Amino acid sequence: MTSVDAAVTRLAREEGGHVLALLAARFGDLDLADEAVQDALVRAVETWPARGVPDDPAAWLYRVAHNTAVDRLRRAASAARRLADAAPDLVREPDEPEEVPIVEHSAVGDEQLRLMLLCCHPALDRDAQVALTLRLVGGLTTDEIAAAFLVPEATLAQRIVRAKRKIRGARIPLTIPADLGDRIGALLTVLYLIFNEGYLARGSADEALRTELADQAIRLTATAADLLDGDPEAGGLLALELYHRARMATRLDAAGDLVLLEHQDRTRWDLAMIGRADRALRASLETGDAPGPYRLQALIAAEHAHAATAADTDWTRIARLYDLLLQWTPSAVVALNRAVAIAMADGPRAGLAALDAIPGLDGYHLRHATAGELLLRAGEPVRAVAAFERALPLTANAAERRHLQRRLAEARARTAADPGGPAQDGLAH
Amino acid sequence: MEYMLILAADAETNATMSVLGEPGFAEQIARWVDFNRSLIAEGSFIAGGRLQDVETATTVTFDDGATSLTDGPFAETKELFGGYYVIHAADLDAALAIAKRVPFTDGVVEVRPLLARTADDGSISPSV
Protein backbone atom coordinates (compact mmCIF):
# COMPACT_ATOMS: atom_id res chain seq x y z
CA MET A 1 0.00 0.00 0.00
CA THR A 2 1.43 3.41 -0.95
CA SER A 3 1.43 6.22 1.58
CA VAL A 4 -1.34 7.96 -0.40
CA ASP A 5 -3.48 4.79 -0.34
CA ALA A 6 -2.90 4.53 3.40
CA ALA A 7 -3.83 8.20 3.89
CA VAL A 8 -7.04 7.73 1.87
CA THR A 9 -7.98 4.56 3.79
CA ARG A 10 -7.42 6.35 7.08
CA LEU A 11 -9.47 9.31 5.86
CA ALA A 12 -12.33 6.99 4.83
CA ARG A 13 -12.37 5.21 8.20
CA GLU A 14 -11.96 8.27 10.42
CA GLU A 15 -13.85 10.95 8.49
CA GLY A 16 -15.93 9.17 5.84
CA GLY A 17 -18.82 8.58 8.23
CA HIS A 18 -18.81 12.20 9.50
CA VAL A 19 -18.88 13.63 5.99
CA LEU A 20 -21.51 11.17 4.80
CA ALA A 21 -23.68 11.97 7.83
CA LEU A 22 -23.42 15.71 7.20
CA LEU A 23 -24.24 15.42 3.50
CA ALA A 24 -27.11 12.96 4.07
CA ALA A 25 -28.62 15.43 6.54
CA ARG A 26 -28.05 18.46 4.27
CA PHE A 27 -29.40 16.88 1.09
CA GLY A 28 -31.89 14.48 2.72
CA ASP A 29 -30.63 11.70 0.48
CA LEU A 30 -28.51 8.84 1.78
CA ASP A 31 -27.63 7.36 -1.63
CA LEU A 32 -26.54 10.72 -2.98
CA ALA A 33 -24.35 11.34 0.07
CA ASP A 34 -22.80 7.87 -0.17
CA GLU A 35 -22.03 8.20 -3.88
CA ALA A 36 -20.58 11.68 -3.37
CA VAL A 37 -18.22 10.46 -0.63
CA GLN A 38 -17.14 7.48 -2.76
CA ASP A 39 -16.50 9.77 -5.75
CA ALA A 40 -14.43 12.11 -3.59
CA LEU A 41 -12.33 9.23 -2.22
CA VAL A 42 -11.67 8.01 -5.78
CA ARG A 43 -10.65 11.57 -6.68
CA ALA A 44 -8.21 11.58 -3.75
CA VAL A 45 -6.57 8.36 -4.95
CA GLU A 46 -6.27 9.83 -8.45
CA THR A 47 -5.03 13.31 -7.66
CA TRP A 48 -3.10 13.16 -4.37
CA PRO A 49 -0.04 11.30 -5.73
CA ALA A 50 0.69 14.27 -8.05
CA ARG A 51 -0.62 17.15 -5.91
CA GLY A 52 0.26 15.79 -2.48
CA VAL A 53 -2.00 15.09 0.49
CA PRO A 54 -3.91 18.29 1.47
CA ASP A 55 -3.13 19.95 4.81
CA ASP A 56 -6.63 19.23 6.09
CA PRO A 57 -7.78 16.04 4.36
CA ALA A 58 -11.14 16.00 6.17
CA ALA A 59 -12.02 19.52 4.98
CA TRP A 60 -10.90 18.54 1.46
CA LEU A 61 -13.12 15.43 1.54
CA TYR A 62 -16.13 17.41 2.69
CA ARG A 63 -15.69 20.14 0.06
CA VAL A 64 -15.13 17.75 -2.85
CA ALA A 65 -17.96 15.41 -1.82
CA HIS A 66 -20.33 18.36 -1.34
CA ASN A 67 -19.52 19.72 -4.82
CA THR A 68 -19.93 16.24 -6.32
CA ALA A 69 -23.37 15.94 -4.73
CA VAL A 70 -24.44 19.33 -6.13
CA ASP A 71 -23.16 18.32 -9.61
CA ARG A 72 -25.09 15.07 -9.45
CA LEU A 73 -28.29 16.89 -8.46
CA ARG A 74 -27.87 19.36 -11.34
CA ARG A 75 -27.29 16.57 -13.86
CA ALA A 76 -30.35 14.67 -12.59
CA ALA A 77 -32.47 17.84 -12.85
CA SER A 78 -31.39 18.59 -16.41
CA ALA A 79 -32.03 14.97 -17.47
CA ALA A 80 -35.51 15.22 -15.95
CA ARG A 81 -36.07 18.55 -17.77
CA ARG A 82 -35.12 16.99 -21.12
CA LEU A 83 -37.59 14.18 -20.42
CA ALA A 84 -40.29 16.73 -19.50
CA ASP A 85 -39.64 18.62 -22.77
CA ALA A 86 -39.96 15.39 -24.75
CA ALA A 87 -43.12 14.15 -23.03
CA PRO A 88 -44.80 17.15 -21.36
CA ASP A 89 -48.10 15.29 -20.79
CA LEU A 90 -46.48 12.51 -18.82
CA VAL A 91 -43.78 14.17 -16.78
CA ARG A 92 -44.03 17.21 -14.58
CA GLU A 93 -41.39 19.95 -14.95
CA PRO A 94 -38.80 19.29 -12.23
CA ASP A 95 -37.99 21.80 -9.54
CA GLU A 96 -34.65 23.56 -9.62
CA PRO A 97 -32.30 21.87 -7.17
CA GLU A 98 -32.04 23.94 -4.04
CA GLU A 99 -28.80 25.76 -3.45
CA VAL A 100 -27.21 24.07 -0.46
CA PRO A 101 -24.48 26.21 1.05
CA ILE A 102 -21.25 24.63 2.20
CA VAL A 103 -21.18 24.63 5.99
CA GLU A 104 -18.09 24.12 8.10
CA HIS A 105 -17.44 20.36 8.01
CA SER A 106 -16.35 19.95 11.61
CA ALA A 107 -19.77 20.95 12.94
CA VAL A 108 -20.87 17.35 13.18
CA GLY A 109 -22.84 15.88 16.04
CA ASP A 110 -26.46 14.93 15.73
CA GLU A 111 -25.94 14.13 12.07
CA GLN A 112 -23.65 11.23 12.84
CA LEU A 113 -25.91 9.87 15.57
CA ARG A 114 -28.83 10.08 13.14
CA LEU A 115 -26.84 8.10 10.56
CA MET A 116 -25.88 5.46 13.15
CA LEU A 117 -29.49 5.08 14.29
CA LEU A 118 -30.62 4.82 10.66
CA CYS A 119 -28.08 2.06 9.92
CA CYS A 120 -29.25 0.17 13.03
CA HIS A 121 -32.98 0.74 12.43
CA PRO A 122 -35.01 -2.20 13.75
CA ALA A 123 -36.83 -2.48 10.39
CA LEU A 124 -33.53 -3.73 8.90
CA ASP A 125 -32.28 -7.19 9.74
CA ARG A 126 -29.22 -7.58 11.92
CA ASP A 127 -26.83 -8.58 9.12
CA ALA A 128 -27.91 -5.54 7.13
CA GLN A 129 -27.48 -3.29 10.20
CA VAL A 130 -23.90 -4.49 10.68
CA ALA A 131 -22.98 -4.15 7.00
CA LEU A 132 -24.53 -0.69 6.67
CA THR A 133 -22.91 0.61 9.85
CA LEU A 134 -19.45 -0.50 8.75
CA ARG A 135 -19.94 0.73 5.19
CA LEU A 136 -21.59 4.11 5.85
CA VAL A 137 -20.46 5.08 9.36
CA GLY A 138 -17.20 3.14 9.50
CA GLY A 139 -15.97 3.93 6.00
CA LEU A 140 -14.98 0.34 5.21
CA THR A 141 -15.23 -0.90 1.63
CA THR A 142 -17.60 -3.69 0.65
CA ASP A 143 -14.76 -6.15 0.00
CA GLU A 144 -13.17 -5.38 3.40
CA ILE A 145 -16.46 -6.08 5.20
CA ALA A 146 -17.00 -9.25 3.15
CA ALA A 147 -13.49 -10.47 4.04
CA ALA A 148 -13.97 -9.72 7.74
CA PHE A 149 -17.29 -11.57 7.94
CA LEU A 150 -16.21 -14.39 5.60
CA VAL A 151 -19.12 -13.93 3.20
CA PRO A 152 -18.83 -13.62 -0.59
CA GLU A 153 -18.43 -10.01 -1.68
CA ALA A 154 -21.46 -10.28 -4.01
CA THR A 155 -23.64 -11.40 -1.05
CA LEU A 156 -22.50 -8.49 1.07
CA ALA A 157 -22.90 -5.96 -1.75
CA GLN A 158 -26.43 -7.28 -2.35
CA ARG A 159 -27.22 -6.98 1.37
CA ILE A 160 -26.20 -3.32 1.34
CA VAL A 161 -28.06 -2.54 -1.90
CA ARG A 162 -31.20 -4.17 -0.54
CA ALA A 163 -30.99 -2.26 2.75
CA LYS A 164 -30.47 1.07 0.98
CA ARG A 165 -33.41 0.31 -1.31
CA LYS A 166 -35.60 -0.35 1.73
CA ILE A 167 -34.46 2.85 3.44
CA ARG A 168 -35.41 4.83 0.35
CA GLY A 169 -38.53 2.87 -0.66
CA ALA A 170 -40.15 2.52 2.75
CA ARG A 171 -38.87 5.97 3.76
CA ILE A 172 -36.97 5.07 6.93
CA PRO A 173 -36.28 8.50 8.42
CA LEU A 174 -32.90 10.02 9.24
CA THR A 175 -34.14 11.38 12.55
CA ILE A 176 -33.54 10.91 16.25
CA PRO A 177 -36.77 9.44 17.68
CA ALA A 178 -38.27 10.86 20.85
CA ASP A 179 -38.04 7.47 22.55
CA LEU A 180 -34.42 6.40 22.14
CA GLY A 181 -34.53 3.41 24.50
CA ASP A 182 -34.86 0.48 22.10
CA ARG A 183 -32.86 2.20 19.41
CA ILE A 184 -29.78 2.60 21.64
CA GLY A 185 -30.00 -1.09 22.49
CA ALA A 186 -29.92 -2.05 18.80
CA LEU A 187 -27.03 0.33 18.11
CA LEU A 188 -24.94 -1.05 20.99
CA THR A 189 -25.70 -4.63 19.93
CA VAL A 190 -24.43 -3.91 16.42
CA LEU A 191 -21.28 -2.18 17.69
CA TYR A 192 -20.53 -5.09 20.04
CA LEU A 193 -21.09 -7.60 17.21
CA ILE A 194 -18.60 -5.70 15.05
CA PHE A 195 -16.07 -5.66 17.88
CA ASN A 196 -16.50 -9.39 18.54
CA GLU A 197 -16.12 -10.26 14.88
CA GLY A 198 -12.72 -8.60 15.10
CA TYR A 199 -11.84 -9.88 18.55
CA LEU A 200 -12.91 -13.52 18.45
CA ALA A 201 -10.48 -15.67 16.50
CA ARG A 202 -13.13 -17.35 14.38
CA GLY A 203 -12.68 -18.33 10.75
CA SER A 204 -9.69 -17.41 8.68
CA ALA A 205 -9.83 -13.65 8.11
CA ASP A 206 -6.32 -12.31 8.57
CA GLU A 207 -5.17 -10.88 11.87
CA ALA A 208 -4.47 -7.35 10.62
CA LEU A 209 -8.01 -7.03 9.30
CA ARG A 210 -9.42 -8.35 12.61
CA THR A 211 -7.41 -5.82 14.60
CA GLU A 212 -8.61 -3.05 12.31
CA LEU A 213 -12.21 -4.18 12.75
CA ALA A 214 -11.89 -4.19 16.55
CA ASP A 215 -10.29 -0.73 16.45
CA GLN A 216 -13.01 0.59 14.19
CA ALA A 217 -15.67 -0.79 16.57
CA ILE A 218 -13.95 1.02 19.46
CA ARG A 219 -13.82 4.27 17.46
CA LEU A 220 -17.54 4.01 16.61
CA THR A 221 -18.48 3.08 20.19
CA ALA A 222 -16.51 6.05 21.53
CA THR A 223 -18.33 8.32 19.07
CA ALA A 224 -21.71 6.83 20.00
CA ALA A 225 -21.00 7.12 23.73
CA ASP A 226 -20.05 10.75 23.19
CA LEU A 227 -23.08 11.60 21.03
CA LEU A 228 -25.47 9.78 23.37
CA ASP A 229 -24.33 12.25 25.99
CA GLY A 230 -23.00 9.89 28.56
CA ASP A 231 -25.47 7.03 28.11
CA PRO A 232 -24.02 4.76 30.82
CA GLU A 233 -24.42 1.50 28.90
CA ALA A 234 -22.66 2.98 25.84
CA GLY A 235 -19.81 3.97 28.19
CA GLY A 236 -19.86 0.46 29.65
CA LEU A 237 -19.60 -1.09 26.20
CA LEU A 238 -16.66 1.17 25.37
CA ALA A 239 -14.88 0.09 28.57
CA LEU A 240 -15.62 -3.58 27.84
CA GLU A 241 -14.18 -3.32 24.31
CA LEU A 242 -11.08 -1.52 25.58
CA TYR A 243 -10.39 -4.18 28.26
CA HIS A 244 -10.61 -6.92 25.62
CA ARG A 245 -8.53 -4.94 23.14
CA ALA A 246 -5.81 -4.46 25.78
CA ARG A 247 -5.18 -8.20 25.87
CA MET A 248 -5.95 -9.00 22.22
CA ALA A 249 -2.28 -9.59 21.32
CA THR A 250 -1.93 -12.37 23.90
CA ARG A 251 -5.03 -14.42 23.10
CA LEU A 252 -3.42 -16.55 20.34
CA ASP A 253 -0.13 -18.44 20.48
CA ALA A 254 2.40 -18.70 17.65
CA ALA A 255 0.50 -21.66 16.16
CA GLY A 256 -2.75 -19.65 16.14
CA ASP A 257 -4.28 -21.63 19.02
CA LEU A 258 -6.41 -19.93 21.65
CA VAL A 259 -4.58 -19.11 24.87
CA LEU A 260 -6.90 -19.25 27.90
CA LEU A 261 -7.05 -16.15 30.06
CA GLU A 262 -5.19 -17.86 32.92
CA HIS A 263 -2.24 -18.69 30.64
CA GLN A 264 -1.95 -15.33 28.88
CA ASP A 265 1.26 -13.33 29.33
CA ARG A 266 -0.06 -10.47 31.46
CA THR A 267 3.13 -8.44 31.05
CA ARG A 268 2.12 -7.96 27.40
CA TRP A 269 -1.30 -6.50 28.20
CA ASP A 270 -1.65 -2.86 27.09
CA LEU A 271 -1.64 -0.84 30.32
CA ALA A 272 -2.49 2.47 28.64
CA MET A 273 -5.54 0.84 27.07
CA ILE A 274 -6.57 -0.62 30.45
CA GLY A 275 -6.26 2.89 31.92
CA ARG A 276 -8.54 4.25 29.21
CA ALA A 277 -11.02 1.43 29.93
CA ASP A 278 -10.91 2.24 33.67
CA ARG A 279 -11.74 5.90 33.00
CA ALA A 280 -14.65 4.99 30.69
CA LEU A 281 -15.99 2.48 33.22
CA ARG A 282 -15.68 4.88 36.16
CA ALA A 283 -17.52 7.61 34.22
CA SER A 284 -20.28 5.17 33.22
CA LEU A 285 -20.83 4.18 36.86
CA GLU A 286 -21.25 7.78 38.02
CA THR A 287 -24.95 7.81 37.12
CA GLY A 288 -25.52 5.72 40.26
CA ASP A 289 -28.21 3.51 38.69
CA ALA A 290 -27.94 -0.30 38.73
CA PRO A 291 -25.40 -1.26 36.06
CA GLY A 292 -26.85 -2.88 32.94
CA PRO A 293 -25.37 -5.79 30.98
CA TYR A 294 -22.50 -3.91 29.30
CA ARG A 295 -21.32 -2.26 32.51
CA LEU A 296 -21.52 -5.60 34.36
CA GLN A 297 -19.44 -7.31 31.65
CA ALA A 298 -16.97 -4.41 31.80
CA LEU A 299 -16.76 -4.80 35.60
CA ILE A 300 -15.96 -8.50 35.12
CA ALA A 301 -13.34 -7.68 32.47
CA ALA A 302 -11.87 -5.09 34.87
CA GLU A 303 -11.42 -7.73 37.57
CA HIS A 304 -9.35 -9.81 35.14
CA ALA A 305 -7.44 -6.80 33.82
CA HIS A 306 -6.34 -5.77 37.32
CA ALA A 307 -5.37 -9.22 38.66
CA ALA A 308 -1.55 -9.31 38.62
CA THR A 309 -1.63 -13.08 38.15
CA ALA A 310 -4.43 -15.51 37.35
CA ALA A 311 -4.27 -16.70 40.98
CA ASP A 312 -4.96 -13.15 42.22
CA THR A 313 -8.34 -13.01 40.47
CA ASP A 314 -11.22 -12.16 42.81
CA TRP A 315 -13.52 -14.99 41.67
CA THR A 316 -16.02 -14.41 44.49
CA ARG A 317 -16.67 -10.90 43.21
CA ILE A 318 -16.81 -12.15 39.60
CA ALA A 319 -19.37 -14.82 40.55
CA ARG A 320 -21.47 -12.10 42.20
CA LEU A 321 -21.27 -9.94 39.04
CA TYR A 322 -22.42 -12.95 36.99
CA ASP A 323 -25.41 -13.31 39.36
CA LEU A 324 -26.39 -9.74 38.46
CA LEU A 325 -25.68 -10.25 34.74
CA LEU A 326 -27.88 -13.33 34.75
CA GLN A 327 -30.82 -11.14 35.84
CA TRP A 328 -30.40 -9.00 32.70
CA THR A 329 -29.35 -11.74 30.31
CA PRO A 330 -30.86 -15.05 31.48
CA SER A 331 -28.91 -17.08 28.92
CA ALA A 332 -27.39 -20.52 29.38
CA VAL A 333 -23.99 -19.22 28.27
CA VAL A 334 -23.94 -16.57 31.02
CA ALA A 335 -25.02 -19.26 33.50
CA LEU A 336 -22.11 -21.42 32.30
CA ASN A 337 -19.63 -18.59 32.93
CA ARG A 338 -21.19 -18.10 36.36
CA ALA A 339 -20.65 -21.80 37.14
CA VAL A 340 -16.97 -21.46 36.18
CA ALA A 341 -16.59 -18.43 38.46
CA ILE A 342 -18.24 -20.36 41.34
CA ALA A 343 -15.86 -23.28 40.74
CA MET A 344 -12.89 -20.93 40.87
CA ALA A 345 -14.19 -19.26 44.05
CA ASP A 346 -15.61 -22.24 45.96
CA GLY A 347 -14.04 -25.32 44.37
CA PRO A 348 -14.89 -27.70 41.51
CA ARG A 349 -17.77 -29.46 43.32
CA ALA A 350 -19.65 -26.18 43.82
CA GLY A 351 -19.00 -25.38 40.16
CA LEU A 352 -20.28 -28.78 39.01
CA ALA A 353 -23.45 -28.33 41.07
CA ALA A 354 -24.06 -24.93 39.44
CA LEU A 355 -23.35 -26.47 36.02
CA ASP A 356 -25.83 -29.31 36.57
CA ALA A 357 -28.53 -26.78 37.44
CA ILE A 358 -28.41 -25.17 33.96
CA PRO A 359 -31.01 -26.58 31.57
CA GLY A 360 -30.75 -26.72 27.81
CA LEU A 361 -26.97 -26.93 27.32
CA ASP A 362 -26.61 -30.59 26.32
CA GLY A 363 -25.70 -29.73 22.71
CA TYR A 364 -23.12 -27.10 23.67
CA HIS A 365 -19.50 -28.32 23.60
CA LEU A 366 -18.27 -25.80 26.18
CA ARG A 367 -20.70 -27.17 28.77
CA HIS A 368 -19.12 -30.62 28.52
CA ALA A 369 -15.58 -29.26 28.20
CA THR A 370 -16.14 -27.23 31.38
CA ALA A 371 -17.55 -30.27 33.18
CA GLY A 372 -14.45 -32.22 32.06
CA GLU A 373 -12.11 -29.61 33.51
CA LEU A 374 -14.00 -29.42 36.81
CA LEU A 375 -14.14 -33.23 37.11
CA LEU A 376 -10.37 -33.41 36.54
CA ARG A 377 -9.87 -30.87 39.30
CA ALA A 378 -12.26 -32.81 41.53
CA GLY A 379 -10.09 -35.93 41.05
CA GLU A 380 -12.56 -37.83 38.85
CA PRO A 381 -10.68 -38.53 35.60
CA VAL A 382 -13.02 -41.34 34.44
CA ARG A 383 -16.03 -39.02 34.39
CA ALA A 384 -13.81 -36.29 32.91
CA VAL A 385 -12.96 -38.58 29.96
CA ALA A 386 -16.68 -39.13 29.35
CA ALA A 387 -17.33 -35.36 29.43
CA PHE A 388 -14.54 -34.54 26.96
CA GLU A 389 -15.75 -37.34 24.70
CA ARG A 390 -19.20 -35.76 24.64
CA ALA A 391 -17.74 -32.32 23.88
CA LEU A 392 -15.61 -33.35 20.88
CA PRO A 393 -18.29 -34.17 18.27
CA LEU A 394 -20.15 -30.95 19.17
CA THR A 395 -17.58 -28.52 17.69
CA ALA A 396 -16.13 -28.23 14.18
CA ASN A 397 -13.64 -25.49 15.06
CA ALA A 398 -10.13 -26.90 14.42
CA ALA A 399 -8.39 -24.99 17.23
CA GLU A 400 -11.07 -26.01 19.74
CA ARG A 401 -10.91 -29.64 18.62
CA ARG A 402 -7.13 -29.70 19.05
CA HIS A 403 -7.56 -28.26 22.54
CA LEU A 404 -10.24 -30.82 23.50
CA GLN A 405 -8.16 -33.71 22.16
CA ARG A 406 -5.21 -32.60 24.33
CA ARG A 407 -7.46 -32.40 27.38
CA LEU A 408 -9.00 -35.81 26.62
CA ALA A 409 -5.50 -37.35 26.39
CA GLU A 410 -4.60 -35.75 29.72
CA ALA A 411 -7.76 -37.14 31.35
CA ARG A 412 -7.06 -40.63 29.99
CA ALA A 413 -3.48 -40.53 31.27
CA ARG A 414 -4.80 -39.67 34.72
CA THR A 415 -7.36 -42.47 34.57
CA ALA A 416 -4.50 -44.94 34.20
CA ALA A 417 -2.69 -43.41 37.16
CA ASP A 418 -5.71 -42.96 39.43
CA PRO A 419 -9.19 -43.87 38.23
CA GLY A 420 -10.72 -41.92 41.11
CA GLY A 421 -13.31 -44.53 42.02
CA PRO A 422 -15.90 -46.31 39.92
CA ALA A 423 -17.21 -44.26 36.97
CA GLN A 424 -20.87 -44.96 37.76
CA ASP A 425 -20.40 -43.59 41.25
CA GLY A 426 -22.05 -40.27 40.34
CA LEU A 427 -21.65 -37.22 42.53
CA ALA A 428 -22.25 -39.07 45.76
CA HIS A 429 -18.74 -38.90 47.14
CA MET B 1 -46.28 8.59 1.88
CA GLU B 2 -48.92 5.87 1.91
CA TYR B 3 -48.56 2.50 3.55
CA MET B 4 -50.70 -0.62 3.60
CA LEU B 5 -51.08 -2.46 6.88
CA ILE B 6 -51.77 -6.12 6.13
CA LEU B 7 -53.36 -7.79 9.15
CA ALA B 8 -53.06 -11.52 9.65
CA ALA B 9 -53.46 -14.07 12.43
CA ASP B 10 -53.33 -17.84 12.66
CA ALA B 11 -56.48 -19.95 12.40
CA GLU B 12 -56.57 -20.56 16.14
CA THR B 13 -56.54 -16.85 16.93
CA ASN B 14 -59.19 -16.22 14.27
CA ALA B 15 -61.36 -18.92 15.84
CA THR B 16 -61.21 -17.20 19.24
CA MET B 17 -62.47 -13.89 17.83
CA SER B 18 -65.92 -13.25 19.22
CA VAL B 19 -68.86 -13.35 16.87
CA LEU B 20 -72.03 -11.32 16.98
CA GLY B 21 -74.12 -12.13 20.00
CA GLU B 22 -71.37 -13.80 22.02
CA PRO B 23 -70.01 -12.29 25.24
CA GLY B 24 -67.08 -9.97 24.63
CA PHE B 25 -68.18 -9.12 21.09
CA ALA B 26 -69.24 -5.57 21.87
CA GLU B 27 -65.99 -4.83 23.73
CA GLN B 28 -63.91 -6.24 20.88
CA ILE B 29 -65.73 -4.21 18.24
CA ALA B 30 -65.45 -1.10 20.41
CA ARG B 31 -61.65 -1.39 20.44
CA TRP B 32 -61.53 -1.52 16.63
CA VAL B 33 -63.99 1.34 16.29
CA ASP B 34 -61.84 3.44 18.66
CA PHE B 35 -58.74 2.63 16.62
CA ASN B 36 -60.50 3.51 13.34
CA ARG B 37 -61.80 6.78 14.78
CA SER B 38 -58.32 7.73 16.02
CA LEU B 39 -56.89 7.16 12.51
CA ILE B 40 -59.63 9.28 10.96
CA ALA B 41 -59.26 12.03 13.58
CA GLU B 42 -55.50 12.37 13.01
CA GLY B 43 -55.94 12.29 9.21
CA SER B 44 -54.06 9.02 8.64
CA PHE B 45 -57.00 6.94 7.43
CA ILE B 46 -57.43 6.32 3.69
CA ALA B 47 -59.16 2.94 3.56
CA GLY B 48 -59.53 -0.28 5.47
CA GLY B 49 -61.69 -3.26 6.18
CA ARG B 50 -62.01 -6.72 7.64
CA LEU B 51 -62.26 -9.71 5.29
CA GLN B 52 -64.64 -12.62 5.62
CA ASP B 53 -63.14 -16.00 6.57
CA VAL B 54 -60.56 -17.59 4.30
CA GLU B 55 -63.09 -20.29 3.32
CA THR B 56 -64.84 -17.64 1.22
CA ALA B 57 -61.71 -16.93 -0.90
CA THR B 58 -61.44 -17.73 -4.59
CA THR B 59 -58.12 -17.31 -6.38
CA VAL B 60 -57.81 -16.32 -10.05
CA THR B 61 -54.50 -17.52 -11.49
CA PHE B 62 -52.99 -16.02 -14.66
CA ASP B 63 -50.73 -18.27 -16.68
CA ASP B 64 -49.46 -16.97 -20.01
CA GLY B 65 -52.62 -14.90 -20.35
CA ALA B 66 -55.05 -17.71 -19.56
CA THR B 67 -56.99 -17.66 -16.27
CA SER B 68 -58.08 -20.45 -14.00
CA LEU B 69 -59.89 -20.51 -10.66
CA THR B 70 -58.97 -22.17 -7.39
CA ASP B 71 -61.14 -22.53 -4.32
CA GLY B 72 -59.12 -20.98 -1.49
CA PRO B 73 -56.43 -18.34 -0.78
CA PHE B 74 -53.36 -17.90 -3.02
CA ALA B 75 -50.91 -18.97 -0.36
CA GLU B 76 -51.35 -21.68 2.26
CA THR B 77 -49.61 -20.20 5.27
CA LYS B 78 -50.04 -20.41 8.99
CA GLU B 79 -51.00 -16.74 9.15
CA LEU B 80 -54.23 -15.92 7.34
CA PHE B 81 -54.75 -12.50 5.75
CA GLY B 82 -57.78 -11.11 7.54
CA GLY B 83 -57.95 -7.34 7.05
CA TYR B 84 -56.15 -4.25 5.87
CA TYR B 85 -55.69 -0.51 6.23
CA VAL B 86 -54.25 2.02 3.81
CA ILE B 87 -52.84 4.96 5.75
CA HIS B 88 -50.99 8.23 5.34
CA ALA B 89 -47.78 8.52 7.36
CA ALA B 90 -44.80 10.86 7.19
CA ASP B 91 -42.27 8.03 7.21
CA LEU B 92 -41.79 4.40 8.22
CA ASP B 93 -41.39 5.28 11.91
CA ALA B 94 -44.80 6.99 11.89
CA ALA B 95 -46.37 4.06 10.01
CA LEU B 96 -44.85 1.56 12.46
CA ALA B 97 -46.16 3.59 15.39
CA ILE B 98 -49.68 3.29 13.92
CA ALA B 99 -49.20 -0.45 13.21
CA LYS B 100 -48.31 -1.00 16.87
CA ARG B 101 -51.66 0.55 17.88
CA VAL B 102 -53.69 -2.06 15.95
CA PRO B 103 -55.96 -3.60 18.65
CA PHE B 104 -54.57 -7.12 18.27
CA THR B 105 -53.80 -9.42 21.17
CA ASP B 106 -52.17 -12.01 18.88
CA GLY B 107 -51.39 -11.73 15.18
CA VAL B 108 -49.07 -9.99 12.74
CA VAL B 109 -49.18 -6.72 10.83
CA GLU B 110 -47.05 -6.33 7.70
CA VAL B 111 -46.28 -2.70 6.85
CA ARG B 112 -45.63 -2.05 3.15
CA PRO B 113 -45.24 1.31 1.40
CA LEU B 114 -47.45 1.88 -1.63
CA LEU B 115 -45.63 2.60 -4.88
CA ALA B 116 -48.64 4.24 -6.51
CA ARG B 117 -52.33 4.76 -5.86
CA THR B 118 -55.42 5.01 -8.01
CA ALA B 119 -57.15 8.39 -7.72
CA ASP B 120 -60.93 8.95 -7.81
CA ASP B 121 -60.82 9.55 -11.57
CA GLY B 122 -59.04 6.22 -12.18
CA SER B 123 -55.62 7.76 -12.94
CA ILE B 124 -52.52 6.44 -11.22
CA SER B 125 -50.32 8.73 -9.18
CA PRO B 126 -47.22 8.07 -7.09
CA SER B 127 -47.67 7.58 -3.35
CA VAL B 128 -46.47 10.77 -1.67
Image (cartoon, coloured by chain):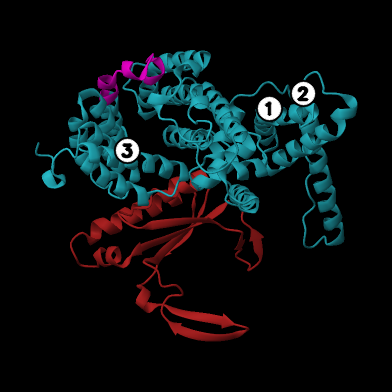
Q: Amino acid at mark 1?
A: Glu
Residue A280 in percent (x, y) is at 46, 17
Callout 2: 10 Å neighbours few (<14), some, many (20+)? some
Q: Which image quadrant: the N terminus of chain A? A: top right
Chain that bears disc 1? A
Name the residue that disc number 3 marks: A410
* Sequence-first tag of 2 and 1: 1
Check the image and report above or below for B115 versus A357. below
Please tell me which residue lies in front, A181 or A321: A321
> Hey, which residue is sitting farthest right in the picture?
A50
Pair 3/2: label in front:
3
Callout 3: 10 Å neighbours few (<14), some, many (20+)? some
**Which label belongs to residue A57?**
2
* Sequence-first tag of 3 and 2: 2
Query: Which chain, by letter, is red?
Result: B
> Hey, which residue is sitting farthest front in the picture?
A417
* Sequence-first tag of 3 and 1: 1
Query: Which chain, by letter, is cyan?
Result: A
Could you tell me which secondary element the residue under label 1 belongs to? helix
Give the distance between the C-alpha atoms of the residues marked 3 and 1, in whole angstroms.
Answer: 52 Å
The residue positioned 47% from the left and 79% from the top of the image is B59
Q: Which image quadrant: the C terminus of chain A? A: top left
**Which label belongs to residue A15?**
1
Q: Amino acid at mark 2?
A: Pro
Q: Amino acid at mark 3?
A: Glu
